[in-house]
């Protein structure tokens, strides 16, 4: 999949002029694992759309402790902070694994969003999806038991449980790394027990 396929297949854009205008300002960029591509307090100048890999949004409290706010792992998801474009970012956004990102300059992208109705609709969809996911996540974290939160994570973020550092996942799920480690060990044992014998 290239950038054009992302815009047409993943996002469903059919306006050829809009797609061509997007592709004209797009670059695909490789971000090595650990790259912080937006820092707390910075104002965005780029739009980052995840092509492949895993990214993380997180903030650091007054004691220097990191708190994971979100994970980005689905192709096409905007890897951006929860704020308006002209506001300082409330968190850092970093590549947890080697990532491929579709990167667009912010100001030019905003102009295209205003110029093409399909892009206006896509932008509105991004906002709605982000708000819905954020609200659902807060509900899960605040109202479910540790076991339920763990099971929710397995379903909502398939494959990430063994690919992402325990510390980051535990922070996201509001539990200790030790609690998460015990649950992962039990999951591994259950999966091993269900393997067919030769």
Image (cartoon, rainbow, N blue to C red):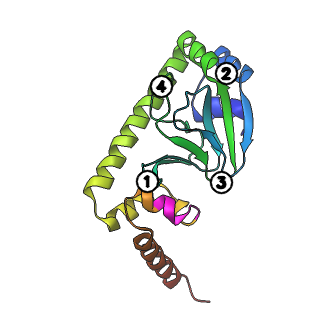
Sort mark 3 into few (<14), some (14-19) or many (20+) by Cα contacts within 10 Å. Answer: some
The answer to the question of whether label 3 and label 4 lie on touching residues, with beta carbons closer than 8 A, is no
Q: Which sits earlier in the primary sequence, circle 1 or circle 3?
A: 1
Q: Secondary structure at mark 2?
A: helix
- Asked if 117 appears above or below 80 in the picture, the reply is above
User: Does residue 15 appear in this view?
Assistant: no
The answer to the question of whether label 4 and label 1 lie on touching residues, with beta carbons closer than 8 A, is no
**Magenta span has 106?**
no
Q: Which sits earlier in the primary sequence, circle 3 or circle 4?
A: 4
Residues in magenta, as a range: 163-169
User: Which label number is shown at residue 87?
Assistant: 4
The answer to the question of whether label 4 and label 2 lie on touching residues, with beta carbons closer than 8 A, is no
Question: Could you tell me residue 101's position as x and y percent?
Answer: 67, 39
The residue labelled by disc 1 is 63
Q: Secondary structure at mark 4?
A: loop
Distance in Å between CA atoms under marks 2 and 1: 42 Å
User: Does residue 133 appear in this view?
Assistant: yes
Using residue 158 as the reference point, say whether residue 145 is left or right of it. Answer: left
The residue labelled by disc 2 is 22
Q: Secondary structure at mark 3?
A: loop
Q: Secondary structure at mark 1?
A: loop
**Residue situated in front as seen by the camera: 70 or 1:** 70
The residue sitting at the front extreme is 63
Distance in Å between CA atoms under marks 4 and 1: 24 Å
Residue at left offset 73%, top offset 37% = 29
Residue at left offset 43%, top offset 36% = 130
- Asked if 145 appears above or below 5 in the picture, the reply is below
Residue at left offset 51%, top offset 65% = 166
Sort mark 4 into few (<14), some (14-19) or many (20+) by Cα contacts within 10 Å. Answer: few
Distance in Å between CA atoms under marks 4 and 2: 24 Å
Mark closer to the observer (4, 1): 1
Distance in Å between CA atoms under marks 1 and 3: 26 Å
């Amino acid at each position: 999949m290239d950038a054009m396929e992302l815009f047409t297949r993943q996002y469903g854009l059919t306006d050829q002029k809009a797609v061509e205008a997007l592709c004209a300002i797009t670059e695909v960029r490789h971000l090595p694992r650990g790259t912080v591509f937006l820092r707390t307090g910075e104002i965005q100048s780029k739009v980052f759309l995840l092509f492949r890999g895993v990214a993380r949004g997180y903030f650091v409290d007054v004691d220097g402790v990191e708190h994971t706010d979100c994970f980005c792992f689905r192709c096409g998801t905007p890897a951006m902070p929860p704020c308006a474009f002209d506001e300082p970012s409330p968190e850092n956004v970093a590549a947890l694994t080697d990532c491929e990102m579709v990167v667009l300059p912010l100001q030019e992208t905003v102009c295209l969003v205003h110029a093409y109705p399909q892009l206006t609709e896509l932008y509105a969809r991004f906002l709605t999806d982000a708000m819905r996911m954020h609200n659902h996540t807060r509900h899960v974290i605040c109202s479910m038991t540790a076991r339920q939160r763990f099971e929710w994570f397995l379903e909502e973020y398939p494959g990430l449980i063994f690919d992402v550092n325990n510390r980051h996942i535990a922070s996201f799920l509001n539990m200790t790394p030790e609690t998460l480690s015990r649950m992962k060990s039990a999951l591994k044992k259950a999966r091993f027990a269900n393997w067919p014998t030769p």
